Image: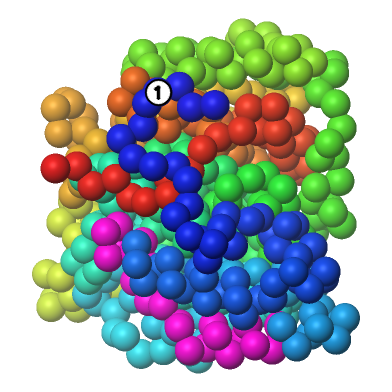
Amino acid sequence: MPDAEFPHDLTPHSAQDDLTTLDAEQLSRGYQRGQFDPLQVTQAVLARIERLNPAVNAYVHVAHDTALEAAHHARQRWQAGQPLSPLDGIPTSLKDLTDVAGMPAREGSLTTVATPCQQDAPPVRRLREAGAILLGKTNTPEFGWKAVTDNRVHGATGNAWNTALTPGGSSGGAATAAALNLGVLHQGGDSGGSIRIPAAFSGVFGFKPTFGWTAQWPPAQAASLSSIGPLTRSPRDAAAMLNVIGRHDAQDPYATRGQPEDWGVEIGTPLTGLRIAYSPRLGQADVDPEIASRVARAAERLAGLGAEIVEVDPPIDSSLEMFRKIWFTASLGVWEGCDARQREQLDPGLVENAMRARDWTSLELFEAFEARHRLTQQLERFHQDYPLLLTPSVAVLPFALNHQVPPASQWHDWEEWAPFSYPFNLSGQPAASVPCGFTSQGLPVGFQLAGARHADVHLLKAATAYMDAYPTAHPAEPYRPR
């Protein structure tokens, strides 16, 4: 149960809202039994989006008519006993950095246009082929460059637990949508924590797969860091989504093979004997005391579920500067690709990063990539002894909207308050944020699990065991402080 008294209701307010609380497995079972159908569910979700989205700005484009049309066809397939997949008729959102045929992809930037895309990105194509109902696009910062969600096109997305606070980013719209049940499956992207950070701030499950196991095209700005992944209410929903999008696709030159046939194959198996390294601070991070206490309790709970918890720090001391070299250079690539008018339209923070990168030499960038290779090797060696690593997901609690860092802090860049996420983009490892309670103010806390590359199924097993034993809560309505 939650740790604190909440400032708003946690229960749905209508029978129609009840349909929006069901997970993918429950929906598929209900469709099969004829208890309800995809059209009823899609109508309920769209009504909830219409009612709640104005308070949080999670969706920046809602494909109302095409979603209803797709739901009508899904209903016919289920009634005929011929669903395309277990995800047929499941309401799904896409991040606004992802191309969806018939929908615009503004990417949070005034430098883009609202013209609908002509083709689907690989994960969208696979979701469409599986019969998922594509609801629309969720908000993101400009080109996903920062770990909060605001931009000059669509404005800021609010946190479901307190709309005056950020949900994190860059998949902040997806995380808020997941927290408020504005759909079941939500696609995010993660180049430095962009799935895990908003999952932690929003109290949902967010999973970054092994690099190359979820195809994407066009490539992200820092393509060698980026992974497409789910934000959902449970690891089971995430595994169901990954069974569709977690497939090789030749369109993505970074795509690799070897994905599990069933991403959830180990879900439900015991944690007995699973060795988990627990690093409360990654050796040096300054973590909010309430986060630290909730994560320490999560470690104890995992031990109670049979895991062997060993407190030890992995070797990642030098990861910040190598990440900045790559990340800021990606911003420089954006800036260089703009004309004079477009450069004036860019987010000033993105431009500042680009200008910092202008002073670096090609040798410095090369050295950052060499250091990245060494970091990856060290972490892979570490995971030979410790299959999973437990840390906080972030070091701070959600803070005020329209700020890159907590306003009262001395920090300048978002990476300074999110030291637990970007190292595992550098290494290409799978990593997830798992909700583990609430603060005294009713704000969610998450812990991170990271694993060796290609150990995604072990991570999903551990996350599911934890959430089955210690289920979380979700808000029925956004809390709007007076």
Judge whether 404 appears above or below 244 on screen: above
What percent of the width, then of the height, locates residue 321?
Answer: 37, 33
- Secondary structure of the magenta portion, mostly? helix
The residue stretch that appears in magenta? 53-74
Q: Is residue 292 left or right of residue 450?
A: left
- Pointer 1 residue: 4
Q: Is residue 67 magenta?
A: yes
Q: Is residue 177 left or right of residue 167?
A: right
Q: Give the tally of numbered discs.
A: 1
Judge whether 151 appears above or below 280 on screen: below
Say which quarter of the image contains residue 114. bottom left
Say which quarter of the image contains residue 77. bottom right
Q: Quadrant of the N terminus?
A: top right
Whether residue 462 is visible here, answered yes or no, is no
Residue drawn at point x = 66 percent, y = 55 percent = 23
As rendered, which of 320 and 474 lies closer to the eye? 474
Q: Mark 1 Cα within 10 Å, few/some/many (few <14, many 20+)?
A: few
Q: Is residue 170 magenta?
A: no
Residue drawn at point x = 79 percent, y = 63 percent = 29
Q: Quadrant of the C terminus?
A: top left
Residue drawn at point x = 69 percent, y = 59 percent = 24
Q: Mark 1 falls on what kind of element?
A: loop
Colour scheme used in the picture? Answer: rainbow
What percent of the width, then of the height, locates residue 169?
Answer: 37, 49
Judge whether 213 appears above or below 479 on screen: below
Q: Amino acid at mark 1?
A: Ala
What percent of the width, then of the height, locates residue 158?
Answer: 28, 51
Residue drawn at point x = 39 percent, y = 58 percent = 173
What percent of the width, then of the height, locates residue 297?
Answer: 55, 13
